[in-house]
């Protein structure tokens, strides 16, 4: 696969949004999709944040790329969500780069965005992550393993809290983002204990790992699509 990509050809599953392959398996740009990709980058810079951008894209019914697996099954075509947009904003293939031998190499594929645009987007992503409290060394990841991975229903990141009782027993919580209506009513934000939420996640993972045939083929296809 690395040798194939070094020649500007594509091998694996579906190409990322903005690209397709020709009859020689060379990567080419899909103009309409490429305009959408560039628009996503530019709108993120001008938006108030990821939630606003996702809302805008979904109102326009923008969807990710539809592609076929090797056995002819249709994948993709879903509304662009937070995960899909983050993948787009972090995909260096849009600079014309290809990943092989563990490194990104430039000038391999046709580019869709300029390097300065990607840099501006990544600077904004980093700034917003710092403001939202990305976990640091003062937080024990064993106490809050879902830090940075837990989002409220509207896409906002959940925070965390610990409280030590007078008995010196420590209580750990994940806290949903504050909502104006909750503040007005005096009910306060929704909190879930770490034990409660993490047990739900562990139970779900266990059930999935008992039946890998249901998700592993799809995951392997996604791993080869260049995202």
Image: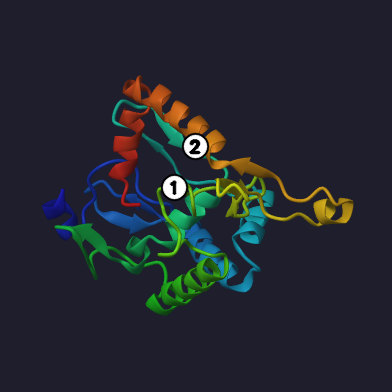
- Say which of 177 and 76 sits in front: 177
Residue 46 seen in the figure: yes
* Residue 97: assigned label: none
Q: Secondary structure at mark 2?
A: helix
Q: Earlier in the sequence, mark 1 or mark 2?
A: 1
For residue 164, side relative to residue 1 (left or right):
right
Residue 7 seen in the figure: no
Query: Where does the image place residue 160, in percent across and percent down from the top left?
Result: 57, 53
Mark 1 Cα-neighbour bin, 10 Å: few <14, some 14–19, many ≥20: some
Mark 2 Cα-neighbour bin, 10 Å: few <14, some 14–19, many ≥20: some
For residue 112, side relative to residue 160 (left or right):
left
- Say which of 121 and 96 sits in front: 121
Q: Which residue is mark 1?
A: 145
- Identify the residue at horizontal 30%, vertical 25% (top origin): 71
- Identify the residue at horizontal 37%, vertical 23% (top origin): 214
Q: Secondary structure at mark 1?
A: loop
User: In the image, is residue 64 above or below residue 28?
Assistant: above
Residue pushed farthest left? 3
For residue 193, side relative to residue 20 (left or right):
right
The image quadrant that residue 44 belongs to is bottom right
Is there a contact, CB below 8 Å, between mark 1 and mark 2? Answer: yes
Residue pushed farthest front? 167
Query: Where does the image place residue 17, in percent across and percent down from the top left?
Result: 43, 52
Q: Which residue is mark 2?
A: 198
């Amino acid at each position: 696969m690395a040798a194939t990509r070094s020649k500007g050809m594509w091998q694996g599953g579906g190409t990322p949004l903005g690209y397709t392959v020709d009859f020689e398996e060379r990567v080419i740009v899909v103009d309409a999709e490429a305009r959408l990709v560039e628009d996503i980058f530019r709108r993120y810079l001008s938006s108030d944040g990821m939630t606003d951008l996702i809302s805008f894209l979904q109102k326009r019914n923008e969807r990710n790329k539809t592609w076929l697996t090797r056995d002819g099954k249709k994948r993709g075509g879903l509304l662009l969500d937070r995960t899909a947009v983050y993948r787009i904003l972090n995909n260096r293939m849009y600079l014309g780069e290809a990943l092989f031998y563990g490194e990104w190499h430039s000038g391999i594929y046709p580019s869709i965005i300029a390097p300065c645009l990607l840099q501006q987007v990544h600077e904004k992503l980093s700034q917003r992550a710092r403001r939202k409290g990305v976990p640091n060394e003062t937080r024990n990841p064993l106490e809050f393993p879902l830090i940075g991975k837990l989002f409220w229903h509207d896409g906002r990141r959940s925070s965390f809290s610990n409280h030590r009782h007078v008995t010196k027993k420590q209580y750990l919580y994940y806290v949903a983002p504050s909502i104006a209506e909750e503040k007005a009513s005096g009910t306060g934000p929704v909190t879930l204990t770490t034990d409660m939420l993490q047990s739900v996640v562990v139970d779900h993972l266990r059930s999935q790992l008992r039946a890998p045939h249901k998700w592993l083929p799809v995951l392997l296809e996604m791993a080869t699509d260049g995202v």
